[in-house]
Amino acid sequence: MTCWKTVNISRELGHNRLAILSVLVGILSFSVLYVPFSIIYKGVTIFEPSIYHVMIGLLLIPVLHKLGHAIPILFTDREFYFKWSFKYQYLPMLKIRVRSNLSKRTSILMVLAPSLFLTVPLLFAATVFPTLYPLLLLFTAINIAISVEDWYTLAFFIKAPKKCVVTKTKNNYDILIQP
């Protein structure tokens, strides 16, 4: 196998630039989503959850995002495992390791899965439960901000040759082709 492209988002964009871009996309997505919802539901009394519920939701969004990456791998015969850890003693961290290479199609689905399986249900929940729409839109915007890195990676996967495999190393993706 020959390496066609090594994708390292932090090296390509820079860690600070990626963080700034994610924050800006998150703020912009919250603003764009909040305006129509506030116009549609202007007469609805907003439910104010406790700070503990909000903090638990904010801690769960990144973990659910990571779990969303594993959903397409469940439907393949690939072996993978989870590694749980805690950063700063209270922030849950989840790492997913796949033991073998993935096809281009599976890699694209793996990168898109959190955007589909988290953003769409949160938007649907915001329409079904209008008293909670500000909180649900905040969670949606956070997931969209986390997904910026995934979308940038998706651009490289789409440009890759049709018959390629993708392997994940510690900090990057290697797109491999047969010569």
Image (tube, rainbow, N blue to C red):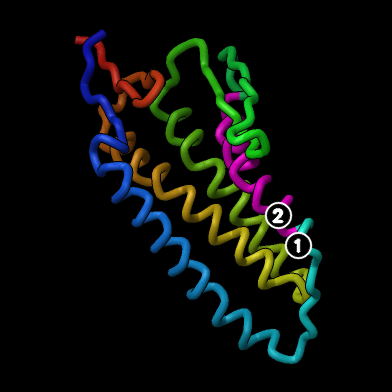
The residue positioned 31% from the left and 37% from the top of the image is 9
Kindly report the secondary structure that dominates the magenta region of the rendered protein: helix
Query: In what element is the residue under mark 1?
Result: helix
The residue positioned 25% from the left and 35% from the top of the image is 11
Q: Is residue 109 rendered to the left or right of residue 19?
A: right
- Closest to the observer, 123 or 11: 11
Residue bearing the label numbered 1: 51
Q: How far across and how far down the image is residue 2, in percent? A: 22, 11
Q: Residues within 10 Å of mark 2 (few under 14, many from 20)?
A: few
The residue positioned 44% from the left and 20% from the top of the image is 102
Q: Is residue 100 rendered to the left or right of residue 59?
A: left
Q: Residue 66, located in which quarter of the rendered image?
A: top right
The residue positioned 70% from the left and 54% from the top of the image is 55
Query: In what element is the residue under mark 2?
Result: helix
Q: Is residue 70 magenta?
A: yes
Q: Does the magenta stretch include residue 100?
A: no
Q: Is residue 74 rendered to the left or right of residue 25?
A: right
Task: Identify the residue at the far left of this view.
Answer: 179
- Indicate the quadrant containing the C terminus: top left, top right, bottom left or bottom right: top left
Residue bearing the label numbered 2: 55
Q: Residue 21, located in which quarter of the rendered image?
A: bottom left
Vertical placement of residue 71 versus 28, above or below: above
Task: Report the span colored magenta.
Answer: 54-73
Vertical placement of residue 124 versus 106, above or below: below
Task: Identify the residue at the far front of this view.
Answer: 88
Q: Residue 166, located in which quarter of the rendered image?
A: top left
Q: Is residue 18 rendered to the left or right of residue 125?
A: left
Which three-letter amino acid code belongs to the residue tagged 2? Answer: Met
Name the mark on residue 64: none
Q: How far across and how far down the image is residue 143, in percent? A: 55, 52
Real-space Cα separation, disc 1 to disc 2, in angstroms: 6 Å
Which three-letter amino acid code belongs to the residue tagged 1? Answer: Ile
